[in-house]
Image (cartoon, grey):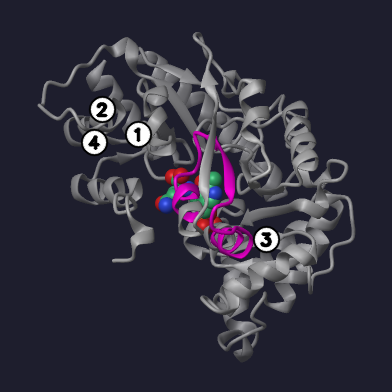
Amino acid sequence: GARRLEGMYENVWVEFAGLARQYQPVNLGQGFPDLPVPPFLRDSMMKAIQSSDMNHQYTRGWGHPKLINALAKLYGPLLGRKLDPESEILVTVGAYESLYCCAMGLINEGDEVILIEPFFDCYVPFAKMAGAKTVCVSLRAKEDAKSSADFCWDENEIRNAFNAKTKCILLNTPHNPTGKVFSRKELELIAELCIKHDVICITDEVYEWLIYSGSEHTRIATLPGMYDRTITVGSAGKTFSVTGWKVGWSMGPSNLIKHLRVVHTNSIYHCSTITQEAVANAIETESERLGDKNCYFRQLPKMLERKRDKMAVLLKSIGVVPIIPEGGYFMMADVSPLGIKFNDGDDTSPYDYKFSRWLIKQKGIACIPPSAFYSKEHKDLSKKFIRFCFIKNDTTMTMAEEKFNEWA
Ligand code: PMP
Ligand code: GLN
C-alpha cells in the first residue's frame, strides 16, 4: 500500500455498519434516515428517468446544467450574491467528494490544516492524503453540559492554531457529532482569523436545513470578506434525506473552484446524470415553495425536533444525560452515570468503542463511538459520550424505547 495511507485502515463506519448488518440491532448508529421517501422526491426521480433519454447519458462534467442552474438560483439569495452556475459551483459525488476535491485541489504538502474537534472523521485522512499537518482545536463539553451550545473552544486555543503555515480551516455547522450550530460570534472569530492569516475556509454545511427552535444557521461565506476565501459544501443526501443518492456540491469563488474541478475531472469526471436531474427537479420544486409551510426544508426540521425531544426523554429514562442538539440529526449522550465497566482485557479500545460494541451485541441498539471524531491525542475528551442518530421512523423509535425499557 501507499505510504500516505498509513494509519488509515481502521474506519468507524466499516466497523459499525458491519456490526449492524451482523447483529441487526435497532439502528441509531450511522446517520441515515429510515423514513419513507416523500412523494415529491420519488416523482423527481421518476421524472428524471422518464423525461429524456439523454438523462441516461454523460452530462457536463462539472455539474449537470439543470442542477447547477437550480443550485445557483437557490443559493444566490442565501449567500447574498449572484452565483455564476458555470464557474462557482461544482457538483460532486456527495459532500464527501467535495471535501476530497478541496483537500486535493487546495492543500500543499507541509501546509497546516485546522480542524475543529470533534470532526467528521474523513477530514483527517483527506488532509493527510494531501500531505498536510492537521492542527486540532478542541470543543470541550462544559461539566454540566445540556445543550450542544455547551461544546465550546478556548478562544486562545483557536487564535494560536493559526500561523503562517495555515492553509485552511475546516468548519462544520450544524456540527456532526454534537449538533452544535456555531453562533455568528464564533464564526466572526474564524472569519477574523482567516482574513488576518490569509486562510481558506472550507465549510461543511450538509445539515444546513436542520436547525431547531431558537437557533439560526449563519453561512460563514456571507460574513464580510469571506466569500472570496470560502468553499461552502452541501449534500442532496442530507438535504432531502436520501443519503443513497450521493450528490453534493461545492460553491465558492471561481479562482478556488477551478482547482477542485481539476481533481474531479481526473478522478470522478462526473456523477450520475439521472440523479443530478432528480436533485435538480427536487430543488426546483422546493424553490417554488420556499416560504410555504409545506416546504420540505421547513417540514423536516419540525418533524425532527419532535424526534429529537422524544429521543432525549428516552435517554433520560435510562439514566443517560442527553446533550440536546441545536441542529443536525445526531445527539450526544453522557453514559457515565450508568457506571458500566468492561473487564474484557481489551485496554487498547477507547471506552466509548467498548460501550458501543456492547450496546449492539448485548442490548440490540446501535450507536456510534464519538472518539472516532477526535484526534489520537484527544480521544479521552469523548470517553463518556455516545452518539445516537434520531432521523428514524416512529416504529424504530418505539423499538428503541422497548429495548431501553427492558434495560432500565
Ligand atoms: N459531512 C458531514 C458532516 C457528514 O455528516 C456527512 C455524512 N453524510 C458528509 C459530509 C458526507 O455527505 P454525503 O453523504 O453527501 O457524501
Ligand atoms: N454522515 C453519516 C454519519 O455521520 C454517515 C457517514 C458514513 O456512513 N460514512 O453517521
Structural distance between the alpha carbons of marks 2 and 1 = 8 Å
Q: Residue at x 47, y 61 (%)?
A: 244
Q: Quadrant of the C terminus?
A: top left
First of labels 3, 1 by sequence position: 3
Give the residue type that dot 4 points to.
Ile
> Residue 281, position in %: x, y?
69, 69
Give the residue type that dot 3 points to.
Ser
First of labels 4, 1 by sequence position: 4
Numbered mark located on residue 250 in the image? 3
Q: Residue at x 29, y 54 (%)?
A: 9
Dot 4, crowdedness within 10 Å: few (<14), some or many (≥20)?
many
Q: Is residue 292 placed above or below 131 in the rendered structure?
A: above
Q: Is residue 81 left or right of residue 152?
A: right
The residue carrying mark 3 has its beta carbon less than 8 Å from ligand 1 = no
Q: What segment is highlighted magenta in the picture?
A: 100-126
- Front-most of residues 167 and 23: 167
* SS at circle 2: helix
Structural distance between the alpha carbons of marks 4 and 3 = 36 Å
Give the residue type that dot 2 points to.
Phe
Numbered mark located on residue 369 in the image? 1
* SS at circle 1: loop
| Residue occupied by mark 2 | 355
